[in-house]
Amino acid sequence: MKAMVLHKARAADERPLAEGDLPIPAPGPGQIRVRVGACAVCHTDLHIVEGELALPRSPIVPGHQIVGVVDEVGPGVSRFRPGDRVGLAWVFETCGSCEYCRAGRENLCDSARFRGLHVDGGYAEYALANAAWAWPVPAGFSDAETAPLLCAGVIGYRALRLSGVRPGGRLGMWGFGASAHVTIQVARHWGCEVFVVTRSPEHQAHARALGAAWAGGPGERPPRALDGGINFTPAGPTVAEGLRALRKGATLALAGIHMSPLPPMEYSLIYGERALRSVANATRRAAEELLALAAAIPIHTDFEAFPLSQANEALSRMKHSRIKGAAVLSIGT
C-alpha cells in the first residue's frame, strides 16, 4: 500500500515524510482494517514530524483523523462488518482496567497507545483500528468533511466543555484553525457570544464569517470579560493574554497536546479563582457526542484537500497558518 512515512523528525519545510510502499496490514483479534478515504492533518502530526513529541518507534506513518470503509474484521469483532463506514481518532486503545479507565476517564490512561505515534496512522491507503475505538460517521457527510471532526472537532468540543462556558455565555478563543472553526459552530449553536484572537487576517475574517462577535490580533483583548476561554495555539506566552481576558471564576482551557514554555506570570492573573487547565486526549463518549452534534447542527467543515503524496505541503501550509479550516489528505477518493 502507498504511505507517507516518517523516518526521522525534521522541520515540516524540509519535507520529512517519504513516499513508501508498505505491506497491507492484517487485523488481529478485536481489530478492523479500514480502507482510508480521507485523513485530516492535525497540529499533533506537526508536533510529531518536527520532533516536539518523542517518537516511541521509527519509522512511523502519521495521521489519526481517519474516515474510511471497513474492509476486513479480525477475530471476535461483531460491532462492524465489511462495508461499514467508520471514523478513527487519536487514541488507538487504552488498557480498560486502570483507575482512570474504570472511572470513565480513559483519556488519562497511562498505557494508552496513539495512532500515528505508537501504531501506523492514516497517511496511508489502509489503517488498523481497535473496533472499540471506531465510530459510525454521520450520514450525508463526505469523508473529507468528516475527517476533521475526529480530533480537531472532538478536542475542541472537550475544550469547550472544560472551559465551563454555558449556553448563552461569552467565550474567547486564541488561535483559529481546524479545531476552532468547528468549535465556534458548537458554541454558536449554544447561543454563545464568541471573541477570537488570531494572528492571521484571513483567519479573523473566517471567524467573523462563522459568527464571531469580534476578532482581533495578538495582544488585543476582547472588548468584554469572558465566561471562559480556549487556547488552541502552541504558544505559551498567549496563556497570559487569555487569563487577562477572563472574568473572576472563569476557566481557560488549553486544547493543544504541546505548548512552548509558559513565561513567568503574576499571581494576579489567576487570583479571583480563575482556573487554567489542559485538555488531554479524548474519551469515546466525547467522540459520540460531537458526531451527534455534527449531524444535528449541522456542522460545516471548511477544508483544503491534498493528495496523499502532498502530505509534506499540507503540513508546511498548516504550520504557517495558510490553511482555511482544515487540511485533508484525500486518499481513497
Image (cartoon, rainbow, N blue to C red):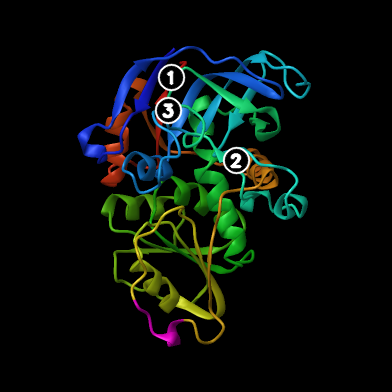
Residue 317 found in image quarter: top left
Which comes before the other along the chain, label 3 or label 1? 3
Which residue is identified by label 3?
Answer: 61
Which comes before the other along the chain, label 2 or label 3? 3
Residue 259 found in image quarter: bottom left
**Image-based side of 330 in relation to 228, left or right:** left
Which residue is identified by label 1?
Answer: 331
Q: Position of residue 74 (x, y in %)?
A: 70, 17
Quadrant including the N terminus? top left
What amino acid is labelled 1 in the image?
Ile
Residue 216 visible somewhere in the drawing: yes
Labels 2, 1: front one? 1
The residue lying toward the viewer, choosing from 271 and 225, is 271
Distance between the alpha carbons at the discs numbered 2 and 1: 25 Å
* Residue drawn where x is 71% and y is 33% of the image: 132
Q: Are marks 3 and 1 in contact (CB under 8 Å)?
A: no
Residue 185 visible somewhere in the drawing: no
**Image-based side of 125 in relation to 227, left or right:** left
Identify the magenta region.
264-269
User: Looking at the picture, does residue 172 appear above or below residue 123?
Assistant: below
Which comes before the other along the chain, label 2 or label 1? 2
